[in-house]
Image (spheres, rainbow, N blue to C red):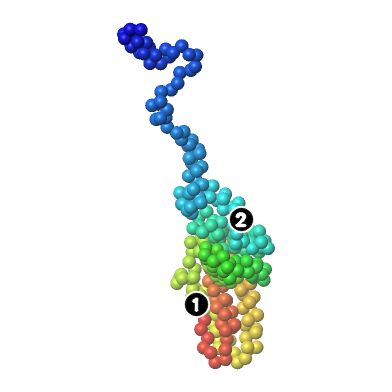
Amino acid sequence: MSTSTARTATTIARIPGSSSSSSAPRRPEHMLATTPSISPSPLQHRARFSHSALASSPPSSSSSPSSSSAAEATAPDADADPDAEPSSSPAPSSSSSSSDEPPTLYGYFPATLPDGPPPRGHFPIDTSLLRREFLRLQAAHHPDKHAPSGGPAKLRAERTSAAINHAYRTLADPLLRAQYLLGLRGVDVAHDEALRAADQPALLAAVMDAHEAIEEAVVPADLEPLRSENDGRVRESEEVLEDAFRRDDVDAAKREAVRLRYWVNIRDSIHNWEEGRPVVLQH
């Protein structure tokens, strides 16, 4: 074969597809070497990122509220008391910075106060039932119970225990309860200097009579008639406040809260009475 014929044959052999073989054409080697690996789909990438983020860091404030709320509602609390009643855990408040804080103090005691505050619920409270539920809650959330766990579990128990204590002290006392309910309506009756007995002569006279009776007492038995009379006044004020809050009559509730403040102060003065000790009635 001549030199020119050999070159022509070589050129034809190098042209892709010119081979007489029936096999499919092969991809050039330089294309195989540069073909990128298959990347994960967006859904796979998102799932991989989410799993890594949840495993390594706490949820951020930009997380979806519905998804985070659902997770909190369905995930069991490792520190919860297995013997505690389900209703003893207060419902979370969407407006609160803590997921354990209910919308009102009434929410801490769902067994005793299932209807919540007035007007749906009642102003008078069965304080014996309230105290029993309070003791159950304190036993379930006492920080010492979570001491072995330490860390966040104990801190959470301390915050919950303090909140339960505050709620109980407020709701167990009729005056603090009335002031709290008025505060929810934007009225600060506890520090309003205009709300005094000066504009209620009958109230002022009753307060002065009680003051004299306490000062003149020699033995505790001397105060029993006043104690009984004053306890009746406290109950009467609770009924008036029940009606006022049910009608959402803030002005009537304010007036009666002033009266109740004096009856509660008299009650405390009787309770703390000591012979020869000066009597100071808070106004």
What x and y, as percent, mark residue 171?
58, 68
Report the front residue among 84 and 264: 84
Query: Residue flagged by tag 1: what amino acid is it?
Result: His
Report the front residue among 207 and 165: 165
Residue for point 50% across, 43% down: 48
Q: Give how far apart the Cα atoms at labels 2 and 1 are.
A: 49 Å
Marked residue nearer the N-terminal end (2 or 1): 2
Residue for point 48% across, 13% down: 21
What x and y, as percent, mark residue 271?
59, 82
Circle 2 — which element? Answer: loop
**7 shown above or below 156:** above
Mark 2 touches mark 1? (CB < 8 Å) = no
Residue for point 62% across, 83% down: 226
Q: Residues within 10 Å of mark 1 (few under 14, many from 20)?
A: few
Q: Residues within 10 Å of mark 2 (few under 14, many from 20)?
A: few
Residue to which mark 1 is pinned? 283
**270 shown above or below 146:** below
Q: Is residue 190 left or right of residue 124?
A: left
In the displayed image of the protein, which residue is found farthest to the left?
Answer: 4
Quadrant of the frame with the N terminus: top left
Residue to which mark 2 is pinned? 76
**104 shown above or below 66:** below
The label on residue 116 is: none
